[in-house]
Amino acid sequence: MDFLNALVALTNYIIIPASTYGAQLALGALGVTLIYGILRFSNFAHGDTMAFGTGLAIIVTWGLQAMGVSLGPLPTAMLALPFAIAGTAVLVLVTDRLVYAHYRRVKAKPVTLVMVSVGVMFVMNAVTRFMIGVDDIKFADGARFVISARGFKEATGLAEPLAFRTTQLLTLVTAAIMVAALFWFLNRTRTGKSMRAFSDNEDLALLSGINPNQVVRVTWIIAAGLAVTAGTLYGLDKSFKAFNYFHLLLPIFAAAILGGLGSPLGAIAGGFIIAFSEVGVTYAWKKVATYMIPGFEAEGLLQLLSTEYKFAVSFVILIAVLLFKPTGLFKGKAV
Amino acid sequence: MSGNRTSASQNMGLRYTLVALVLPALFIIEWINGGPNAALGILNMGLISAILALGVNLQWGYAGLFNVGIVGFIALGGLAPVLVAMPPTEGAMSAGGGRIALALLAGIAAIALAIAVNRKAPGKTRIIAVPTVLIAGFAIFRMIFDPGVEAVQAINPSATGFLGGMGLPTLLAWPLGAALAAGAAWAIGKTALGLRSDYLAIATLGIGEIIVAVLKNEEWLSRGVMNVNGIPRPWPVPYEIDIQADAAFIERAAGLGLDPVTASTVLVKLLYTGLFGAVLLALIWLSQRALNSPWGRMMRAIRDNEISAAAMGKDVTRRHLQIFILGSAVCGLAGAMLISLDGQMIPSGYNPLRYTFLIWVMVIVGGSGNNWGSVVGGVLIWYLWIKAEVWGPQIMDLVTASMPPGDLKSHLLDSAAHMRLLVMGLVLILMLRFSPSGLLPER
Amino acid sequence: MSYLDASGMTGGYGGADILHDCTLKVDLGQIAVIVGPNGAGKSTAMKAVFGMLNLREGKVLFDGEDITALSPQDRVRKGMGFVPQVNNVFPTMSVEENLEMGAFIREDDFRETMEQVYDLFPILREKRHQNAGELSGGQRQQVAVGRALMTKPKLLMLDEPTAGVSPIVMDELFDRIIEVARTGISILMVEQNARQALEIADIGYVLVQGANRYTDTGAALLADPDVRRTFLGG
């Protein structure tokens, strides 16, 4: 019984939240890693692209709600998602045209592009604030739980509760679909393969007649799709606050670098490793330990770090990767 | 060719003249419109901004290093006045200070041991040994650390609840602020330099966030969100109250036709101006000397062509580390000065938009690689940043004046505050695109 | 007139001229080899034919058409294939995907061409699902040549195809190149291994300082005592 309770506690407090968060990070890191692979710079504006897209999704959600449209048990925001992706894709394509394209033409150093992306981040941040303000916004509607804590306790008779929220299930399912679609696209379609070729060897890709402008365009559209999905899922799961997405930059970059910049598979693995480390390190293990070790009386909470320092976890992992394996787990292209 | 050069240098001369006329004019106008206090207030922060821009220009302009964690180095420098100038909290050292110090030492020892194990341990055992050492070290650290922190924070939490400082003169905190920032820069530079240029940017982004998080949460150190107030002023700046009580001062102020309150506030600000101006001038002098020394030429050679510089036997990574530390130290110094000016440390106020990206706008607008450019950019952008706070709502009022009252109007009025973010972002992008060498280009 | 007729090429990468009045001609089904000392502008001459540097003077005629102003990509569409010396495969893509990318500009069905490439290089069929980056040097060169063949070029240009491969692999590669030429494709290649290359060459160009020094059939050049002494080490 104690073992079951421990298992439930572990699932409830670690496995479910970390998987959800990991899926969100993975989607974000995929966008960063794709842009890095094709455009060859770390896009600091990615967090704010997520924020902008989520803001757009919220506004469309409000519009749909006002019209009385709903998805039943699912959040209305899922219906708004395609519109938000389209809008964000337009924004990043226009940005690329007006801002980044010039630096590709003059073959600027990557660090210049990084700095430009910081400028873009600034502007996107302001646009998002104009659009939706700086307040904390909760926009999840529909059914709240797939498994509610009380229902689980009554059904199983265990002491420990297990809650599984709709947004968590939705995050996992949506992320799985997105990732499957992305890999199908990259590995099976002509355009997807041309993107991989471009990322692998730009000169040879050009020689082979691959159109760089098309590759860049498709990359931005996909990155926008991933960013908006990640941002909206994150916002549904927690809440939307424009500034939080800036803070997501660090774990996202850490995930992408850990997996190997430019490697999509690495970005996914990185996202989950970062998420599990973050949740695991900031979780108070007292309860699980008490169940697992009979007669054990913990003095403290057995919490390695307080939750305020969860970003320190990504940072430490990032530093360790830079020190020991700068190419990342899946051999990214960058050293 | 020579004709070209003359016109180019004439052009430069014109730019310098223009800047030398416009900047003072802005402050004179501000002085007349807003009074001396407002003008000097902007100027003092402008001087600190100039120093910050100078530090960042060392990194970017001399070496092409992109630091996205300036806010962290400023915050770390800002901790120095707290540690140096605040009076020590009575009983804190005996209650838990010793434990905390011991814990920190244990932490450092664990990291050192881990490094040693990593170097010495044979092959695969490392993969297990290093994490074991680190985890065990962390557990020991927490075991010593936590009771100490609790004890310290229990001491009169509403007024102190932290270790306090050493009760030394505030001026001593300035070099310490520089040293603290330099230490952090060393650790980061050691890790991220020598890899791709993006990695430094990402690593500094991280350290910036972590430092601010530490200051926000470690109450025993910085009182966290409760802020540290009443940090003593640096010599020779007096307190207004004290000089207002001074009969001789009142008399002299009356002689100038000023009331004692205005006179005292202006005097205090002027003294700060003198202090900051002196530091700024010293730093410019040093930077200019460095720039034109063989060392500076080598730095620029490395920046312009890393590969050929490396081929000529220059240790690029080492040089980069050097300049990264120097630049961060200057940011730390400015951070300490900032806290000395404010007299309080508000950890939650360290916002990366304001303390990282605004500095970048200053450097790029001023002219990267040009020290005078950084100074001009620092002062000018700070002026615009402050004024934009006033102008934004005014412009919005104008724009919305003819609108019927309603949601849209109030939304627009509310969002005026975000205007300056937008403007600064656009300024950065436009400068990078159309005038990457800035107002005062590098020669 | 020859199928490829690049005459009087003069130019460089922006600074001083590297090529001085250099002329290269290849007929259909012929193997032309460019040899010469280091820094003679051999690769540069070939890149000039492919449009990778701006010519100040001279022109490139291909199948009678003046293509001097065309970009490399457009020249690929006209029937040129180019195999760079290094970085000539997509390392994280499978062999088959490499070939597919070679056929990127083709709108028609290219499976038949792929089969021909596999027939020419049987080892590639065996390793079709393996990533090109994991293959040996010689196999990678075969992928690179195969990729360039996917557009069914009329002229295949090879920049030092045998650089860094063992002598046995080199012989095999040369055999394959002869086979390619037999299918009616012109070959223009730059080679360090001058003696072996001239042995299979219908026509050889000896370049020195960006200018033609000797031009003759491969056999004649091999027999020329001057060429032997100066460029072939006796």
Image: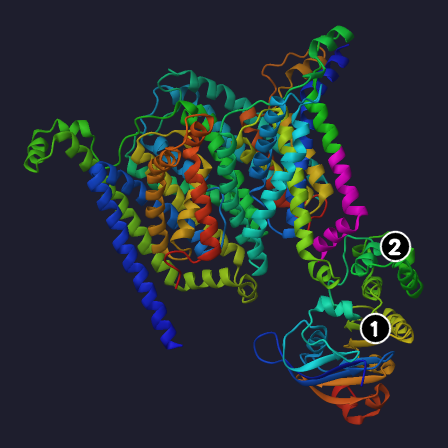
Residue B236 appears in the figure: no
Per the rendered image, the range of residues in magenta is: A177-201
Q: Is residue C232 above or below residue C106?
A: below
Q: Amino acid at mark 1?
A: Lys
Most foreground residue, A194 or B306: A194
Q: Give the mark nearest the N terminus, 2 or 1.
A: 2
The secondary structure type at the circle numbered 1 is loop
Q: Please provide percent x and percent y for residue B262.
A: 16, 32
Quadrant of the rendering where the C terminus of chain C is positioned: bottom right
Q: Please provide percent x and percent y for residue C97.
A: 82, 54
Residue A85, quarter of the rendered image: top right
The tag on residue C154 is: 1
How are the residues colored? rainbow
Residue drawn 76% across the image and 57% down it? C90
Residue A229, quarter of the rendered image: top right
Residue drawn 69% across the image and 12% down it? A149
Q: Please provide percent x and percent y for residue C2.
A: 81, 84
Most foreground residue, C69 or A194: C69
Residue drawn 85% across the image and 59% down it? C108
Give the crowd class for mark 1: few <14, some 14-19, many >=20 residues within 10 Å.
Answer: many
Give the crowd class for mark 2: few <14, some 14-19, many >=20 residues within 10 Å.
Answer: some
Mark 2 vs mark 1, CA separation in Å: 25 Å
Mark 1 belongs to chain: C
Q: Is residue A67 above or below residue B321?
A: above
On the image, numbered disc 2 is attached to which residue? C128
Please state if C6 lies on the left or on the right of B26 as rendered: right
Q: Is residue A87 magenta?
A: no
Q: Amino acid at mark 2?
A: Arg
Q: Of helix, strand and loop, which mostly describes the magenta segment?
A: helix
